Amino acid sequence: MDLLTLLQEKFSYSEFRPGQREIIESVLEGRDTLAILPTGTGKSLCYQLPGYIFPGTILIVSPLLSLMQDQVEQMKRRGEKRAVAFNSFLSLQERLFVLKNFNRYKFIYTSPEMLQKEEFLKKLKEIPISLFVVDEAHCVSQWGYDFRPDYLELGQLREHFGRPPILALTATASQEVLADIKEKLEMTNVQKFLFSVDRPNIALKAEIFPTYKEKAERFLELIESLEGPGIVYFSSKKMADEWSLTLREKGFHTNSYHADIPQENRILLQQQFLYNQIPLMLATSSFGMGVNKENVRYVIHFHPPVDLESYWQEVGRAGRDGKQSIAILLFTDRDFRLQNQLIEKELPNTDKAEIFLRWLKNEEIVLDEEKTQRPPDDFSETEWRILSKYYRQFPNANRFIEVIGNFFEQRLRLKQEKLAIMNRWIFHIGCRRENLLRYFGENKKMNIKECCDHCGVNMERYYRKRKIHTTSPSMDWERRLMELFNIPR
Amino acid sequence: MINLNYLAVVVLYCIKRFKGERSLSAGYYLLSGKKSAQTTQDAAWYQLQPLYKSFPNLKEEHYFKIVRQLSEEQFVENKQKISQITEEGKAWLANILQKYPIPSYLNGWRFHQASDIFWKRLNLLIQTLSNWAHDESKFYPVERNLLVQEEIRSWLKKMVPRYGKKDISFHLYNELHKLLKSGEEFQLKPEVFAYKLTGYEMPGLTNQQLGMHLQGDEYYYQLCFLDCLHYMLSTIWNERSNYPLLASLCSDLQESYGLSKSAKISYSYLQQGKSLEEIAKIRRLKLNTVQDHIVEMALYLPEFPIHPYVPKELERKISETIKTSKLKKLRNIKELVPEADYFQIRLVLSKNANDR
């Protein structure tokens, strides 16, 4: 069957997006393939479609747990029931269920941590794997903005699976990172595909305020005048919560969304956003990846991200339908401090390493690869992952502390460099798009009318045409029940 | 204006019931549903079973923040690690509970296991039927647990041929309507249940959102929601024939009688006529642990005889002491009945709680 027919039949698309066909053909030839694609441009199709041609299983490794969950649900929705996300979100019973019915799955998403688990690995070795997909492949590189030591083992792991071709996907394309990906994943005879990360339908704007108060006022003004749906990114959960209260009191339909919100509520909020019942989401970076909402008209950064990679990924959630959209970043002096705190908080330092050792000793805990141990409250998810990973490798206490210390120093320096680049971009005088594209190794080719605040943005375009009036639903349970079951009155 | 939410009401209620006889964490363990002999005993002795596991996601630091707020308002007095409700606290609590009583069908102890699964199944099933009723077969499931998805799939496979794709919706609607209607006279809040359900392009509301549309806060609606589920389960189980579809969704679920796994094993040895010492030896447990199991049995097994361990006369004496002194703290009781050991006092306390 030819690819186009397959695309139509399985995905109901009539044509490929730029790059997809080339990548799929390379994969089908059995070649190691490295593809640099911006987010939101149909990355997942590049490995899902070959699944209908290859005889064996497609194994997808991704660090983003909720994203893989969302993708599996999307596949199920289009009728592909043979997909599963095997990660730490599953309960023990669910895991046993999956392992027992292992043969029914054609698309297996998993996290690098899970690939350490003997039982799971054993099952994987028993089945034919036709394609090994490494999503967010920049995580393998210590030069990347999101280095995950777990990723370093993926290259070796492939050998256990009968050496299927690798498809490595990323949205960042710095030369050192790409070289690192090829080396660490032990890719050979690589086909490389590079596509522009530009999103010409999103206008870029950054506004700088002398005080927080002025920034907050401007924020309110924007929320009141911009045409939604929109997403506002905060770097603190607490701020997202507080603003959501404030805005609700002013009559906006909005909600905060972050990692502390229980999963069942996150699913509801995503759906409410999708169906425009909440046209404004106040979120931390954990929101948006799995949300296939095409008509997001604006993204506001209430807090600046700590690197351009994250910024661009978040901005990319606007305008997926190709229509004109805008990204506005709001900045004030005190954000400098916040950014620095964020960077340091993310990384485990030697103090944390010592607390970690003491904790292990006190609790008489043996780090067990079979069980997923929940990090105790003092540790963030990231810290815990990195500490336990290095502890397994370097169980000697002194050596362990030294390794963590070096890791911290090296990562911190890199993060600070990335932060400096981010902030230079915020204060950049000149075309923002050009500056950003150059960072990603591209030249600005197109002449874009709504480009950035330097080249000129017509704000009128983004304002709301009609005033929205908010109504509270009347809470009549009998009517709701009738609506649910579509019972005529 | 006092700025306390309903979680604070519930915490204060627990503190009041504990009468300063339990550590501060006891309330946290109870509300978050810790599975320990101590917590289950606390729930029974202090009649707090309805609230057991009513806030499974509650974080410890959040709980203690609430306790601090209560102290700041002078509703709670802290003396040497012991917290007690003040007169002001009592007045405030009584006032709020009059307006917003703790829902009456709530029974976390009996239903926490069953209601969680029941809700997940019902929610996914109704979402599925709602989409079908709107001629849509593709949707994002609101419930992602693989096992629940599997259960609903096979439930539909079995039931659809029996009822027909259209009629099954209608039947389920009728059963639900009848069931919720019947609860209205008991102050049930069916709107909480109905608006948490998800349907075709109608995502359910979160507790917080319910609080915005109705009067109250998210913690209050969490309890009202559980109240609905517990009412539904107990009614369905009592009148299976009236609710055949709903009954088939929860026929495999059980009330939690509370014997821990380990206590169940000890129980079976006990039934074989083994003594406590023998059980401890066979199972390589401390005698204390086996005694814990016996206390569990006294707490949860109706008619469990405690006389092999407490002579009748002593039991009477302990009971009297508890009644007249209104004490539940073991040490205090022991001071008044020095001839009894702690195991015996716990047994009598548990037996009394069970008889109630």
Image (cartoon, coloured by chain):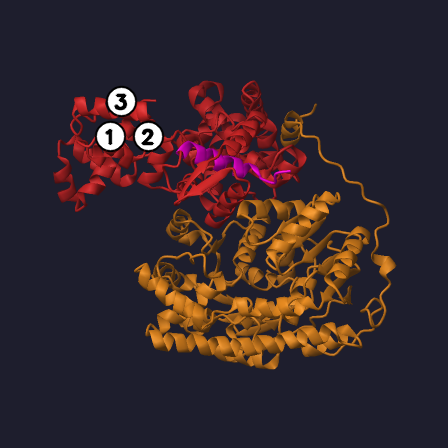
Q: Is residue B327 left or right of residue B313?
A: right
Q: Is residue B137 left or right of residue B48?
A: right
Chain identity of mark 3: B
Return the x and y of residue A472 as percentages of the image width and height. Answer: 72, 35
- Residue B336 numbered mark, or none: 1
Q: Is residue A379 visible?
A: yes
Instruction: In the picture, one chain is red; tell me its letter.
Output: B
Mark 3–mark 1 Cα distance, whole angstroms, equals 11 Å
Q: Which residue is mark 2?
A: B327
Q: Which residue is mark 3?
A: B320
Dot 1 and dot 2 residues touching (CB under 8 Å): yes
Rendered hue of chain A is orange
Q: Is residue A468 left or right of residue B341?
A: right
Amino acid tagged 2? Leu
Label located before the other in sequence (1 or 2): 2
Q: Quadrant of residue A203?
A: bottom right
Q: Residues within 10 Å of mark 2 (few under 14, many from 20)?
A: some
Which span of residues is magenta-colored?
B1-18
Magenta part, dominant SS:
helix
Q: Quadrant of residue A116?
A: bottom left
